[in-house]
Image (spheres, rainbow, N blue to C red):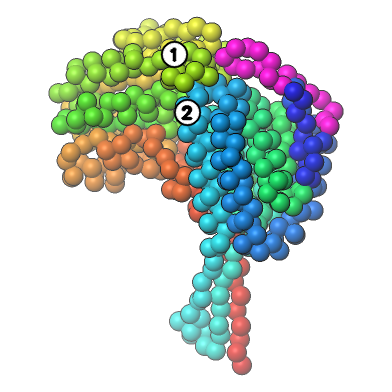
Amino acid sequence: MKQNLWINGENVEAENYRPLFNPYTGGQIAEVADATSAEVNRAIDSAAEAAGQMAEMNAYNRADILRRVADYIAEDREECAKLIVEESSKPLKAARAEVDRTIMTYTFAAEEARRIQGETIPMDAAPGGEGRIAYTVKEPLGVIAAITPFNFPMNLVAHKVGPAIAAGNTVVLKPASQTPLSAFKIASYFHKAGLPAGALNVVAGSGKSVGDVLITDDRVKKVTFTGSPEVGTYIREKAGLKRVTLELGANSALIVDEGTDLSKAMPRIVTGAFSNQGQVCISIQRIYVHENIAEEFVSQFVKEAGRLKVGDPMEEETDVAAMISAGDVQRALSWIHDAVGQGAELVLGGESEQQVLKPTVLLNAKPTDKISCEEVFAPVVHINTYKDFDDAITQVNESQFGLQAGVYTNDLQKAFRAAKNLHVGGVMINDIPTFRVDHMPYGGVKQSGTGREGVKYAVEEMTELKLVSFKLD
């Protein structure tokens, strides 16, 4: 299979191509276009030319296009899921769940397109404002650059493209190098749904050849990025006065208080730790358990994690499959070995086979171990204990990240203390930090980024507020 660029509503032959390999089997999937700077500029040209048409498009037309895209994905649900599996090694059942969420995200985007609205301003509330009527309108920014990661190759594209189109913008999309096929698939659905040529362009390639052009071109009015803090910082430094939304990951933590029904919570917690091989920004990485229930918690957690089926992502029952690259496996293993060398106890996993890192559980890792203080982005969890609930909150906050945190407790006062004092973008009470539905505000503090996703909130950041004032006499 040969995958071209998607520019101005057409498949465009590229100057360069590269092979794309299945992370689990190692077999070649496709030859994928590797865009040059000139080709990226051509995509920006196309988006800039289409910006006026998109800005003039009626809200109901934008909504109808987004609704049709959701319907096309639903019709091809299984095909889309298997495409995600093939290029990312996400287990099939998780890939189906992602497709379902993608459908929901575009559905929300269609709804939000119909309710972008301003407000009237009571000008006579201030002296000198008498005899005036004023109102605000929200207008599209223009060209938006969307840079997406590999771990949710359809739904995280939807979280950027859906709100952008809903608000009347045009998009140049750079998907992750390992997972471009899902993005091109989505572009074909938008074309079929009647999106004007040039309103969505997809250019695969390296960060240097594609990303640098996107973030420095003055015609691009906003960059929305999901990825590493290092790249996010680079984008922020290079983007100038462009708007920037950055979702940069975390080492998400869970507090488990005494009195928690462990048998009820455990399957959920294990899912939050190991789903998609731990390659989720809000995957559970750190667990702080009250000392009175720690022994039972560890016993149940290790037992439940040991039940996970590891292997071929195309098999219906597989829970954990290959990580995205061999380099990521080796990095995670080195962090595990370093933690053990510093005194952590390895009680499950810690070994790999065929680019599959087995679910791994460590006890009592030090706060300074990379496995604790950095984002491991792998199926690795460490469990520590606490005596005082407020001390657990402090331990969670002693992180450079702050995306989401979870708290299991039956004490309402503790729940409210956690909600107030945890320095994160989202606090999930009696649930895992890995919880997300696609219309809620989502984003972090500290090194976890700036801005918020969630369709309604992304639309806000993809529009410009304009005041209109009439003097009546």
Within the magenta stretch, is there residue 84?
no
Report the residue that reaches farthest toward the front.
75
Q: Is residue 201 above or below residue 219?
A: above
Q: What kind of residue is marked 2?
A: Ala
Location of mark 2 (residue): 94
Relative depth, front residue between 184 and 283: 184
**Above/below status of 466 relative to 351:** below
Residue, disc 1: 310
User: Considering depth in this image, is 52 or 2 the residue closer to the camera?
Assistant: 2
Camera-side residue of 127 and 51: 51
Picture quarter containing residue 362?
top left
Q: Residue at x 69, y 55 (%)?
A: 142
Q: Quadrant of residue 8?
A: top right
- Secondary structure beneath label 1: loop
Find residue 385 and report its image quarter.
Answer: top left
Secondary structure under tag 2 reads helix
Q: Residue at x 25, y 35 (%)?
A: 408
Q: Which residues are magenta?
A: 13-30
**Left or right of 293 on screen, residue 226:** right
Q: Amino acid at mark 1?
A: Val
